[in-house]
Amino acid sequence: MKQRILVTGGAGFIGSAVVRHLLTSGKCIVGNIDKLTYAGNTESLASIDSTDDYHFFKVDICDRAGVEDVFEAFRPDAIMHLAAESHVDRSIDDPSAFIQTNIIGTYTLLEAARNYWRTLGLETQKTFRFHHISTDEVFGDLEGAESLFTELTPYAPSSPYSASKAASDHLVHAWHRTYGLPIVVTNCSNNYGPFHFPEKLIPHVILNALQGKPLPIYGDGSQVRDWLYVEDHARALVKVLNRGRVGETYNIGGHNEKRNLEVVEVICDLLDEYVPPGKSSASENISSYRELITFVIDRSGHDRRYAIDASKIKNELGWVPEESFETGIRKTVEWYLENRQWWESVLNGDYRLARLGTSVE
Ligand code: NAD
């Protein structure tokens, strides 16, 4: 029998990779709860949305009655919770949606899941999972060049985004400890890859470069992040969902620590190779995309370094990333070059019109 998995935030960057991955396996029926905020894009699901095994529910996770109706209609075997406000800069400008969705939304979903789970038979209760997908940003700034975040690193979030995710992680662990809800939590490093919303560093740089616009880098660009290709993250999440130990946290990382400036330079070099500058009106005055790099005032509270120790998921579940940064970033640049229609629709706002026609159950 196919596993019935309810994904929240499945129209977002990572959520859509998870939905595509689950449906491509042919072993799952997927329900997707998504409010379709500015970050939700149903065009990222075009390859699977006509499949009978896919069901879309346009619901806000803060809407308790709406979420409970979905549980009743879809009757999931497991939940993968990715819906969140996810952009740090937006959380600094206005934290309210972050508190609402990331904290209240997770609480609402936990309560709806707990009520539903209590109605299941004993055997089904045991196999049910609530998988909470979180970030390494909950651990805050890493001190020293050698240290890594482990599952035991104390939480020390720096931004409204990471603080709201930290709060949601604590709620999920408490619902396990207090009510016995069978949960697993994953904390992952920075993702990149296809269908990434252009406000985030990597797509922003690719698309600005293609348009001959400045490539803004915070501060001196020396902040270090550990980059993971999004499809590797999706594969890791499915492993943890199906084989992770209940109540446990698993860190997920790419073993790809890079300074932000390095990341931008690699993108410029790939674009120099694929779309040599000087041949279009956007790049007629430059000989390398690196000339577009512009340093801007640093983000407040900007953490210097994040890096993950992913040995627990490797040793217990046998997961390691398939892509190195070099192979993943090349695939990503190629994807943006080949999928102009997807990102032009985001940049000109048409993707918001496209979803008016989205089927809602
Ligand atoms: P995203 O911003 O691309 O997508 C979020 C999705 O959630 C969107 O489809 C949006 O419409 C939906 N959503 C937002 N508020 C909602 C609400 N109230 N009700 C229902 N749906 C709502 O985010 P992402 O980058 O795909 O991240 C997904 C998850 O993974 C988040 O929980 C994030 O914290 C976590 N994470 C992200 C990264 C990363 O590098 N992007 C790394 C580690 C963990």
Image (cartoon, helix red, strand yellow):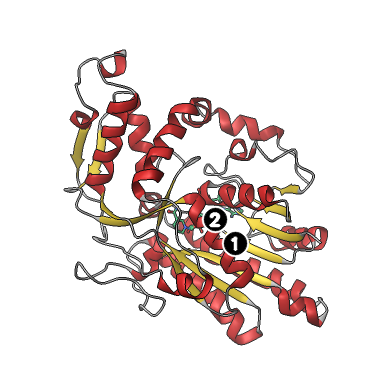
Q: Residue at x 48, y 40 (%)?
A: 194
182 relative position to 302: left or right: right
Q: Percent from the top left, x then y, of residue 204? A: 36, 37
Answer few, some or many: residues within 10 Å of disc 1's Cα (few below 14, many 20 plus, some between 14 and 19).
some
In the rendered structure, which amino acid carries the disc numbered 2?
Ala
Quadrant showing the N terminus: bottom right
Residue at the farthest left position: 220
Query: Which numbered dot is residue 234?
Result: 2
Q: Secondary structure at mark 2?
A: helix
Residue 237 on image: x %, y %:
55, 62
Q: Nearer the viewer, residue 191 or 269?
A: 269
What is the crowding at mark 2: few (fewer than 14 residues within 10 Å), some, or many (at least 20)? Answer: some
Which residue is at a point 65% across and 78% down the rendered structure image? 182
> Which residue type carries mark 1?
Val
Can you identify the residue that label 1 sits on?
A: 238
Let me know if residue 105 appears in the view.
no
**Residue 107 in view here:** yes
- Quarter where residue 141 is shown: bottom left
Q: Is residue 199 above or below residue 126?
A: above
Q: Nearer the viewer, residue 97 or 292?
A: 292
- Residue 114 point in image, percent of width and height: 70, 75
Q: In the rendered view, would you say 279 is above or below 317?
A: above
